[in-house]
Image (cartoon, coloured by chain):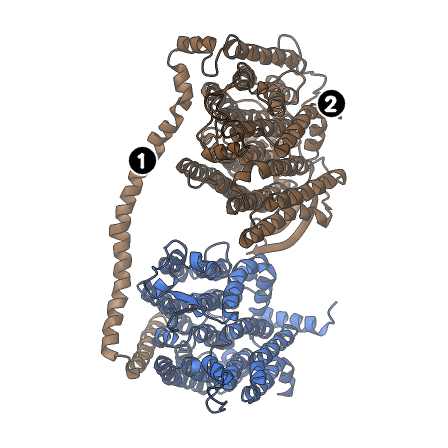
Amino acid sequence: MTDKLIYLWPEVTLFITTCLVMVLGLSPQAEVRRLCAWVSAVGLTVAAGLAANGEPDPNALLPNIMPFAKVVIAAVGLLLLMLLAGTVDREYEADIESGKTKFNPLRSNRAEFYSFFLFSLTGLMLCASAESLIWLFLALELTSLPTYIMVIISTRGAKSQEAGVKYFFLGALGAAFFLFGFSLIFGGTGATHFDDIADSIAANGINPILTLGLLISMIGLSFKIAAVPMHFYTADVYQGAASPVSAMLAFVPKTAGFIAIITICAAVGWNYGPNHTSLPEGLRLVLWITAALTMTVGNMLALRQRSVKRILAYSSIAHSGYMLVGVIAGPGPVGGSFTSNGLAAVLFYLLCYGFMNVGTFAVLASLKHADGSEADDIDDIRGLCSTHPLLGWSMVLCALSLLGMPPLLGFVGKLGLFTSAISAGEYAIVIVLGLNSAIAAVYYLRLIVTPYLDKPAEQDVLRVEKVGIITRPMVAVISAASVIGLVLVAQPLIEASSRAGVATRHGDVHAVEQAAALRDDINEPRP
Amino acid sequence: MLDLAPIAMTLAADSPAAVASAPAWVMLIPAMPMIGVVLCTLMSIMGVRSKLPAFVTVACLAVSFLLTVFMFTGHSEGWATAVGWEWLHYSWGDGNGQNFTANFAFAVDGLTILWMLFVTGLATLIALYASEYMATDVGQGYNRFFIAFNLFVFSMACLVMGSNLLMLYLGWEGVGLCSYLLIGYYYKKPEAVAAAKKAFIVNRIGDVGLALGVYLAFVHFGTIEYTELFASEKLQGYLHDAAEGHWSHIPWQASAIPLFLMVGAFGKSAQLPLYVWLPDAMEGPTPVSALIHAATMVTAGVYLIARTYPLFQVSEIALPIVAWVGTLTALLAATIGMAQFDIKRIMAYSTVSQLGYMFAGLGVMTSVGAGFHVLTHAFFKALLFLACGAVMHGFAGQLDLRKLSGLWKVPGWRIVTIGMFVGCLNLAGFPLTAGFFSKDMILAEAFVTPGFALIGWILLFTAGLTAYYTFRVFFRVFVGPVEYHAGDDHHGDDHAHDDSHGDDHDAGHGFHPHAPGWAINFVLATLAVCSIVAAGLYFIGDHGWVAGMIHDSTAHIDPHGDEAGGSHGSAALFGLDPHKAMYYISSVVGIVGIIFAYAFHLHGRKSAGEAPAADAFKAALGPIPRWAENKWYVDELYQFLFRGPLLVLSHIFRYVDMLLVDGLVNLMGWLPYAVGGRLRRGQDGVLQSYAASMAGGLALFLLVILLLVNQSA
């Protein structure tokens, strides 16, 4: 256990920050309370730095996933933090300022809000470090539990409370499913450590209990990534929560789910099928069907929505389907490059998705109606390019990127998914993916055309205006800039994700050699 | 087919293969205009309402030009590359064509330097000219103009300096975009918008060709980096085969590449059949016409072919096609130019025609001649356009040569007239001007190259036509009796009246031409001097300075045999070496053209509108001049052949789309919606239904998958 500790410094940092923020947020002095966001930012930055300098774990099934995933988590986490800042307690703090009320720690939500956000990110990083089923389960729940509360406290209205309660109960059900699946995996192999599970599978093959356990785990985990058949909650919850929290929900649990799915698949290994490069048939089928249904259902449901948040919720479902294609494709041949490594494609896509999705939500979060309610209807972004050019163009760019338009970031991400699936011989799912990308264009183009081409709404209808929180439009602009800018520096990112996507395979001579070589690399001092 | 085999074609085999690294500051050459874009954008955001953006632009471009000069002086032979950053590197195997690298990198050789020198130099001068020319628009329009102007220079620099075909493509699209933006600068004018659209769409056709060519080059040769591509053994092998005449040894893919690239070049450089956009592009502000649509962007096609000359040499038919297309374009455009009345349009057709010469030059294997003509043409055509622009600026948009006459004698128009005269002499190929030498190189080479004599004769005839229409403009507008009528551009009109002579109506039409200011005069004078001095380049070095630059690049061809000695027995003209004979023949042709123009348009002309001799001659020719004036009805032909059928097709597709595709999409959208609606009604926001669906989904999934797995097992 202690030898594992060297990989966990980012988590430790975040945890310490969390505790600090929780205390600071309850301070009677307003100035100290305001420090919460800053301290969180510092904590995240330090964690990102530690993660970037983190060492690969040569004994793990996915030796390089930790540094990459944690840096991505911290980077997108910083963006989310900027977006989340100022979501809770705005009016309450204003009241205290004007002397209307006094500070009451029981009434204030600030401490919880920031610390739960950091807790969630801590859980997410722990998912990437997980080495056993139990660890993975606890990490997943640490990721999810705070988000339930964040949904509830994100607005003062009843809608978010309803959404939060729904999310909590359904989340518990999903957790029950994959916990049941985990226990069956344990039943089938007699092990909880991924290493031992892999060894057991290599030695004894796959038995029916294990298959059942894997299937149920995958279906249960599809709750986290909002995939069919566990996607029902998505639109309701995203719409009920405040936009910044919705943005977080679309990234944090999804990333946790994907990391968990990749980890479990890596324990089973892509050693089956005719070329010994795919997952066992049952596991491959469940992912295949889930992927195909998820992207299709997500895109179909998004077509006729009027609420931008619901469109984005369904788009988030569809994107989970896209990314599952990369998991099906697997890590590809040993020593292969980005274009044949599906895991690298998924990890890279998570990064892309983080930026472009946060960007779209940030645009929504930056707008409100005159009566203070959130902007959500498609009419609210009508003509945004002429009324609020920066926000409008951010929306256009992020939506174009979500659509996968070359040369934006989303295109580079999607390219990896396509090429890896093709090189793995999964042509059918590639066709489904292609068709769905085309269908998705219908509703993404609405998000592009409405702000860009349409005239702004007339004066007499409820006009949208900018919210008074400067960080939110900043997040929108940063995301939009990243959608272009990261393409220009795509090469190092692609290389990093290709490294992160390397899976060592038990019973595979090459992989053992590769792992040994990797270990040598690590032991040698860097030039 | 034409036999090119005797002409030895080798490249790069004997040029130094080692790639030197260029100093990092060469990247500042494209970066400076980009900084200009940023600064002008900032000024636009801040709402600057002064000439500041123009002077910032001039400063940025001047720095860029100076750096280019340093690049020139510091350059030694061969390639020098500067890598900005590694952009994308994809590989899906180790084989040929399975590694795709696109670097944001710049490669410098003689060709690059030649192009960059005149691109940045002219851009600086024309930006200065535009600072005055666009002055009536100071404010947002002015800022917008200079943003696009800078962006154009940046794109052009990427196009010319890029180290691979993808960078070239990037720049290619960039200049296309800027051209579109600037043609449509007066976006309230329907003609300008239509012209911008036309330019953009016609260029798309060419760009498809270019994209396919680049793609095919990558697939076939496995790289699009110039330094690797032109040194690749495969290409060298083909070149060897081509030199030996073994055309059948070259796979069709390799010989198809130039055919695709050529389409791109024809689109951008306004050659048959894609030339139709360029004359209409004159709707843009005149500095734009001068810089983009005369001097620089339209020579991108010439650059492309010169840059990928080795690729063109591995196809038996590519260069002959280029030669013929260029020749026919030159002739056709010249005939149209003869019958036009709008002086800017005449210059536009003349540009198309002169570009035809450059293509013909490339086609008959004188990349040196083509390159030299590009350079001289850039100067004198920019000069001509800017002089026309000064007229347009001063006479409230008047461009009809029947409504202007004798500007020489109007006060303040001396420099413009002199500039115009110098430009006309060059364009007409008057002996000992720069245009004369560069045109002669192409003409002589056409006679020298076996099988291309007919091209030589056509080009020679066209040279006569060129001299005629050029001096038609000069004799009508700048000399003769003084007479002028204002155009209908009231914008300029108001400006003219600012000179506090508003009550002076003695001229009968109450209009005072607005003589050009210092910036316009300075630029015109500078360009006139450059045009004259450019002739001197012909006498530097072995076969001229340009030859030195071209020989140090991919456009280099081994001169066949002994060029200076003219040992080609087969290619004699009236028993003389064509290189020598051409000086005399083309002098005579040019002067004859000028004499015709004098006889028709100056001799005995009493007013601006009527030239008795020309009108009589026109009447004698019957309907032909009218056909020429209507541009041989090519636009109408295209309308009939392409636009009409496409319109019908688009209507058909619209209905297919509306009924079938929309129907399907709506159905597919409606189905889940309806299902979802039913579900929603059933659950009414109640949590249990979601949970039940989840559990049911789980059960269903398990059932299906276990059945499938068992079946397959």
Of badges 1 and 2, the one in the foreground is: 2
Q: Residue A106 — which label? A: none
Looking at the rendered image, the quarter that the C terminus of chain A falls into is bottom right
Q: Is residue A254 left or right of residue B106?
A: left
Residue B2, visible in the rendered structure:
yes
Left or right: where A312 falls relative to B503: left
- Distance in Å between CA atoms under marks 1 and 2: 54 Å
Crowding at dot 1, Cα within 10 Å, few <14 / some 14-19 / many 20+, comes out as few
For the colour brown, the matching chain is B
Is residue B164 among what the camera can see? no
Image-quadrant location for residue B441:
top right
Quick one: A463 or A475, which is closer to the camera?
A463
Q: In the rendered image, which residue does mark 2 sit on?
A: B539
Q: Amino acid at mark 2?
A: Phe
Residue at x-position 47% and y-position 92%:
A106
Q: Is residue B608 left or right of residue B30?
A: left
Which residue matches tag 1?
B645
Q: Could you say whether the residue bearing mark 1 is in a helix, strand or loop? A: helix
Which quarter of the figure is the N terminus of chain A placed in?
bottom right
Figure check: B1 above or below B289: above
Please say if A339 is above or below B575.
Answer: below
Q: Residue B392: percent from the left, percent from the top?
A: 51, 29
Relative image position of residue A400 (x, y in whole percent): 44, 58
Contact? badges 1 and 2 (CB < 8 Å): no
Query: Chain A colour?
Result: blue
Q: Give the mark count.
A: 2
- Element assignment for label 2: helix
The chain letter for the residue carrying disc 2 is B
